[in-house]
Image: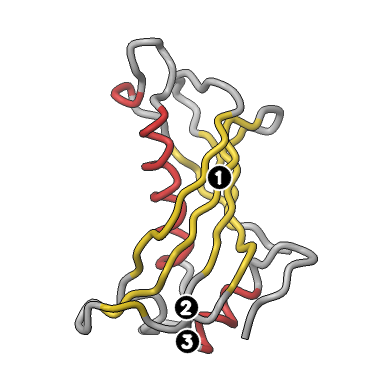
């Protein structure tokens, strides 16, 4: 199983009044990693994969440990846990080598911006995503 790795910098403004990264900021971190995964790594030069848009249908986040500001970035590991006909689920861990701060998942629905409606996952997108499917998971047809 391949995992996408994203090095995410921490910003001074990410902290809340309690001196750790605010819970809402973690959603921004996940978004940065997801966009880097789905768009920068989309297959082929000039490929239309994932370029038509997508919407988030669901987020689930488990906050495991507080994260305080420092100069070193955290690593966000991303992988696919489910591929359906018109949605996919991405799992994440925000971590350092020794500590996991957050475990999360996001259900993403490809979206046709012109028609303003969800669309099916293309064959090219499915092939790309399949490389990142968690061991033991199968995709729906």
Residue wearing tag 2: 86
- Residue 122 is marked as 3
CA distance separating discs 1 and 2: 20 Å
Who comes first in sequence, dot 1 or dot 2?
2
In screen coordinates, is 101 left or right of 23? right
Q: Residues within 10 Å of mark 2 (few under 14, many from 20)?
A: some
**Classed neighbour count for the residue bearing mark 3: other residues with Cα under 10 Å, few (<14), some (14–19), many (≥20):** some
Image height of 2 relative to 23, above or below? below
Asked which quadrant contains residue 90, the reply is bottom right
Where does residue 108 sit, x and y in percent of width and height?
44, 64
In this view, the residue farthest toward the top is: 18
Which numbered disc, 3 or 2, marks the residue closer to the eye? 2
**Nearer-the-camera pick, 9 or 1:** 1
Residue 104: mark: 1
Disc 1 or 3, which lies upstream in sequence? 1
Expressed as whole percent of the image width and height from the top left, the position of residue 81 reads 64, 62
Front position among marks 1 and 2: 2
Residue at position x 22%, y 77% from top? 116
């Amino acid at each position: 199983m391949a995992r996408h790795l994203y090095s995410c910098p921490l910003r001074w403004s990410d902290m809340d009044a309690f001196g750790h990264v605010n819970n809402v900021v973690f959603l921004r971190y996940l978004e940065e990693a997801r966009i880097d995964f789905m768009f920068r790594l989309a297959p082929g030069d000039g490929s239309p994969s994932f370029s038509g848009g997508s919407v988030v249908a669901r987020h689930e986040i488990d906050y495991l440990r507080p994260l305080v500001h420092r100069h070193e970035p955290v690593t966000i590991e991303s992988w696919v846990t489910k591929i359906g006909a018109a949605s996919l689920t991405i799992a994440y861990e925000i971590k350092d080598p020794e500590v996991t701060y957050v475990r999360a998942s996001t259900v993403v629905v490809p979206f046709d911006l012109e028609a303003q409606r969800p669309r099916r996952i293309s064959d090219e997108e499915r092939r790309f995503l399949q490389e990142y499917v968690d061991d033991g998971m199968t995709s729906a047809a």
